[in-house]
Amino acid sequence: MNILVINCGSSSLKYQLINMTNEEVLAQGIVERIGIDGSILTQKVEGRDKYIIETPMESHKIAVKLVLDALVDNKNGVINSMDEIAAVGHRIVHGGERYAKSVLVDDEVVKYIEECIKLAPLHNPAHIIGINACKELMPNTKMAVVFDTAFHQTMPEHAYLYALPYELYKEHNIRKYGFHGTSHKYVSAKVAEVMGKDIKDLKIVTCHLGNGASITAVKDGISVETSMGFTPLEGVAMGTRSGNIDPAIVTYLMKEANYSLDEVNEILNKKSGVLGISGVSSDFRDIEAAASNGNHRAQLALDIFHYRVKQHVASYAASMGGVDVVVFTAGVGENSPETREEVCKGLEFMGINIDPAKNKVRGKLTEISSDSSKVKIYIVPTNEELMIAKDTLALISK
Ligand code: ADP
């Protein structure tokens, strides 16, 4: 049984067709520059050359149509007809407070995703366009939505509320929602599985360190605390995002330094983080290279990033009353031995001891703690698409 996973962005669409019998990815691809000049679809199938279609795509509907065509294409496709797609799973960034789990798509669900546009103005509109395009092109195929925020809906009130006037929560939905939930859920379940333990018996800190980064405390199998907040800007320093700062800096910049609201927004989201500090790049590979060539600001950016992640790991042990496992995942977490080593350094007092030799590995599910380490440390490659496909399959099988 094949599930099509779709992640629709404002001008892009990523997809994977997964055979759920053996969890094999039959095809994966990306459509870029939807609605702009130079639209392009690139499809990858294991063992074959890339299949590229360059043709104007004015809308997401046209993009979805081309994806379906590419999948059933005589020469480059992987299935004979659209009937071989059992269901579609859509990644949705924001599910507000209503959805703590994935759900099948109906009108009411779409309406609520629409209501959440104010909370995720860049993402949710594109998701809705993607859902509607699929609905038109494959009206008889079931669809599910899987929310980035859902896994974190289990956080207790004292964790998700900001110490702001309570009315702001009630009137404007101001609270911590958390993101990357699908990834945190996947890697925490996976690590419990490889350790041969019931996830309910584990206290896990999951570090999703990519361009965007978030840390989550998973206790008894549920998220009890996470570093991203009302928006994905909160938490650790990231590629281009500031993470936590004194909120008064915002009003100071606007009042004393004449920055406009849009400029401050741009600074915090696009010009800060390791890019802002280093002045080199938002890509950790570039920054690590510059730092090893003696660039002080590049080293400083890395130091700040490592320090903030370390602080979160330690404080989440406090949130859970201990920690049994630390998991590293996503682009940086899976591929940077330096990041993992620097994050763990200094946490030996908590029983966290990394094995430098085991840590010399990239992108592979591996235990990297020393034999004497009280806390286990793992690299677990994330797989949000598979998680979305699994949730979708479970929903259509009900
Ligand atoms: P996102 O999905 O948030 O865009 P990813 O999880 O794909 O991010 O991670 C992208 C980041 O991973 C980039 O900053 C990239 O530099 C980093 N990365 C990838 N490979 C390596 C590596 N070998 N060493 C260090 N960082 C890496």
Image: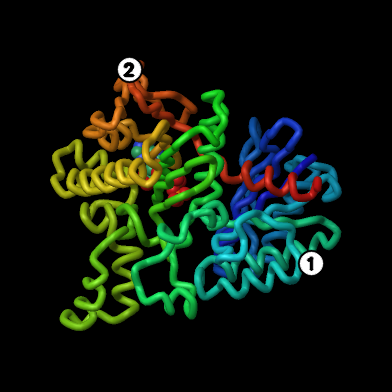
Q: Secondary structure at mark 2?
A: loop
Q: Nearer the viewer, mark 2 or mark 1?
A: 2
Q: Taking 275 as reference, is 35 above or below it?
A: below
Q: What residue is shown at x 57% (from left), y 30% (from top)? A: 198
Asked if disc 2 and disc 1 are in contact, CB closer than 8 Å, the reply is no
Q: Is residue 120 left or right of residue 262?
A: right
The answer to whether any part of residue 33 appears in the image is no
The answer to whether any part of residue 189 appears in the image is yes
Disc 1 crowd rating (10 Å Cα; few below 14, some 14-19, many 20+) is few
Percent x, y for residue 389?
A: 68, 45
Q: Taking 198 as reference, is 75 above or below it?
A: below
Marks 2 and 1 sit apart, C-alpha to C-alpha, by 57 Å
Percent x, y for residue 252?
A: 19, 77
Which residue is the site of mark 1? 136
Q: Amino acid at mark 2?
A: Ser
Q: Which mark is drawn over residue 339?
A: none
Percent x, y for residue 168?
A: 42, 77
Q: Is residue 41 left or right of residue 226?
A: right
Q: What residue is shown at x 63% (from left), y 41% (from top)? A: 386
Which residue is the site of mark 2? 372
Q: Taking 382 as reference, is 158 above or below it?
A: below
Q: Is residue 336 left or right of residue 7?
A: left
User: Foreground: 323 or 9?
Assistant: 323
Q: Amino acid at mark 1?
A: Glu
Disc 2 crowd rating (10 Å Cα; few below 14, some 14-19, many 20+) is few
Q: What residue is shown at x 25% (from left), y 35% (from top)? A: 342
User: Foreground: 305 or 62?
Assistant: 305
Count the marks: 2
Q: What residue is shown at x 55% (from left), y 73% (from top)? A: 117
User: Foreground: 292 or 97?
Assistant: 97
Q: Is residue 175 left or right of residue 254?
A: right
Q: Earlier in the sequence, mark 2 or mark 1?
A: 1
